[in-house]
Amino acid sequence: MRTAKPLLGVLGITGSAILFNCIIPTREARCDEGKTCGAGEICNLSTGICDSVTGEMEPLRGEMEPPPPPECMNESNCLEGKACLLGRCTPCSRHKDCESQVCEPGSNPSGQTGCLPSNQVVYVRSGTGCDNLQGTQEKPTCTVNAALLLFATGPRGSNVRLLGNQGDNYRYQESVNLSGKTVSLYGPASDGANAVVEAPSGNTLTVDATAAGRSAKVLLDGFTISSNANGVVCVGTAGLGSDLTLRRMKLENVSDTDISASRCALTLSSTQVRANRKGALNLSSGTHYEIANTVFMGSSVEPNLNPLITIDSISNGRFVFNTVIDNRSNTYVVNSIDCGISGYKLLQNSILLGLQSPKAALVSVNCHLDYSLLSPKDFFSETGSSHLLSGSPSFASPGDYHLSSTADQACCMNQIPNDQAQGITQDIDGDRRPSRGSLDVGADEVP
């Protein structure tokens, strides 16, 4: 900046002395748009002062950094299935994040992930305003079976979206046959809504490779199944297996067995199975299973020979981070959890409480427990089990089997070494495992 000349002012005369006031301005006197400043300077019209263009300039009052330009205007500007949220390409976490109303958090049977394209989805809504010949968001089909028929009439992908608004409880009164299909059925659970598929008679959902003569790959995600017979039945045969995944599901008020799988590959995660009457889970004939982050609760098994959970001798897989609680068995049931007559099945990192079978052990002799809590232990043989936990967990409220923040530390929280996570990195709600130091037992990880 140009050096200003001192300004002299006479303050007064006293005796023989003349007093001067020397004023040295720190900046050039006021300039205007027509005045030329010195080299390397510019006239700041808001202050009327010549400012250096090479040094730091005082910001204008109220001046703000301009916002960055939006990364996207819609999903077509984003890659890898990301949603366009607030102008940024972001991984989706809920269906309503996506223009198609379908967010796939992992990978579906067709290998798709993230926000699915709308033209690869058939939409369903029971009630008025539906059209079985359209299947679009604006004109959804009236039934799930009508949506499945549209797969054969055009390139509509293999995804079905059961629509619903928060607080609504859409009900679909039908039996659905998914035999021989590669299909994903998405409900509205991730958006806080619900849809119920219930069969007035017969099984609610059937996946039968034997009847179809070909294998199937089926994903059920985010809705409720109810039934006057079986809830979900999966049947395979030699050389023709079926892959069935249930994720974020509810099965309740099922008159017969909730989930029955014979020679299938079954994955059950982040699911609730409650209030059934003839057994919650039956795995047989060499079924390969992955049961994790699931709660089996509030069932009262009527007089019959079905345990609450049956895993036969030739089926194999993992049963890890589950909560089995507040279930009742009748006097005729041999064991509440039956692990077959030979070999053994490992039940890991799980809570097994309130399984009342008056004349037998809660778990059969071939069920081996590891880092699990079992109570009561009547008739139970600890042979083959290790790291058994004990204590009384505290839950959030009656019927809500999330561990409370005051849960007995010695029984349930931080009790499992991190190297025993078995590859499970989230709990039933999608919260991170572990959330603190070590792992919690059961389906819920306390944040």
Image (cartoon, grey):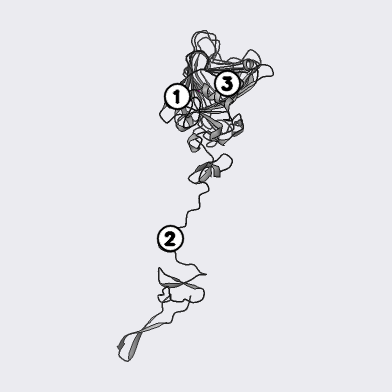
Residue 170 horizontal/vertical position (percent): 44, 24
Residue 436 horizontal/vertical position (percent): 52, 37
Q: Residues within 10 Å of mark 2 (few under 14, many from 20)?
A: few
Which range is magenta? 131-143
Q: Amino acid at mark 3?
A: Leu
Q: Is residue 74 above or below residue 40?
A: above
Q: Disc 3 or disc 2, which is closer to the eye?
A: 3
Q: Disc 1 or disc 2, which is closer to the eye?
A: 1
- Compute the Cα span from label 1 to label 2: 54 Å
Q: Residue at x 47, y 79 (%)?
A: 3
Quarter of the view holding residue 419: top right
Q: Which label's residue is closer to the chain start, 3 or 1?
A: 1
- Front residue of 30 and 164: 164
Q: Amino acid at mark 2?
A: Glu
Q: Amino acid at mark 1?
A: Ser
Q: Residue furthest bottom?
A: 16
Residue 186 horizontal/vertical position (percent): 52, 28
* Pointer 3 residue: 178
Q: Residues within 10 Å of mark 1 (few under 14, many from 20)?
A: many
Q: Is residue 169 something that shows in the picture?
A: yes
- Compute the Cα span from label 3 to label 2: 61 Å
* Pointer 1 residue: 126
- Front residue of 38 and 14: 38
Residue 230 horizontal/vertical position (percent): 52, 15
Looking at the image, how many numbered discs can be counted on the residues? Answer: 3
Q: Which label's residue is closer to the chain start, 1 or 2?
A: 2
The circle on residue 266 is none
Disc 2 element: loop
Q: Is residue 93 above or below residue 44?
A: above
Reply yes or no: does residue 76 show up in magenta: no
* Pointer 2 residue: 63
- Front residue of 167 and 72: 72
